[in-house]
Amino acid sequence: MEFPNEAISEGCSQKKSGRGKIEIKRIENTNNRQVTFCKRRNGLLKKAYELSVLCDAEVALVVFSSRGRLYEYANNRFISFQHSTHSLSFHILTIFTQLYFKAFFLCLFSFLFWCYLSLSIYVCILYNINKLLYLEVQF
């Protein structure tokens, strides 16, 4: 038994509607590249807003264009660069400095802890050697 839709689909290849995949590479035409940047930037900003609202997440997004122009989004709970008296570079520097010092002190603590363990093992070894020497001197 043959269904009517099968007969049509076998005879010709139907074109599916929807978006096709694009090759991800640099767009050579500057006008097309600028239009694509604007559309994708707006889509990215919209996604960041939706993520912050739907998931109650703290979202901050910073985008620099090829011309060096800044576009940013930050929800209310996060640092808002627009309403701040400091520049964006100051905020980024502050955040990176905090992260750097956290990583630095974590590494320093790890190093000092390793030194403490090494020295404590060394002290135990010296204590045992001292104990053996003491026993040899007694006999």
Image: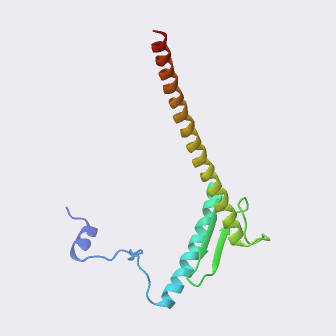
- Left or right? Give the position of 109 relative to 125: right
Evaluate whether residue 57 shows in this view.
no
- Seen from this angle, which residue lies furthest right? 85
Where is 5 relative to 30, above or below?
above
Q: How many marks?
A: 0
Residue 53, x across and y down, in percent: 65, 60
Q: Residue at x 53, y 85 (%)?
A: 35
Where is 122 relative to 90, above or below?
above
Q: Residue at x 58, y 85 (%)?
A: 67
Residue 3, x across and y down, in percent: 25, 65
Q: Quadrant of residue 61?
A: bottom right
Q: Name the residue nearer the viewer: 82 or 19.
A: 82
Q: Quadrant of residue 49?
A: bottom right
Q: How is the image coloured?
A: rainbow
Q: Name the residue nearer the viewer: 24 or 51.
A: 24
Where is 103 relative to 23, above or below?
above
Residue 94, x across and y down, in percent: 69, 63
- Seen from this angle, which residue lies furthest top? 139
Q: Quadrant of residue 114?
A: top right
Q: In which quadrant is the C terminus drawn?
A: top left
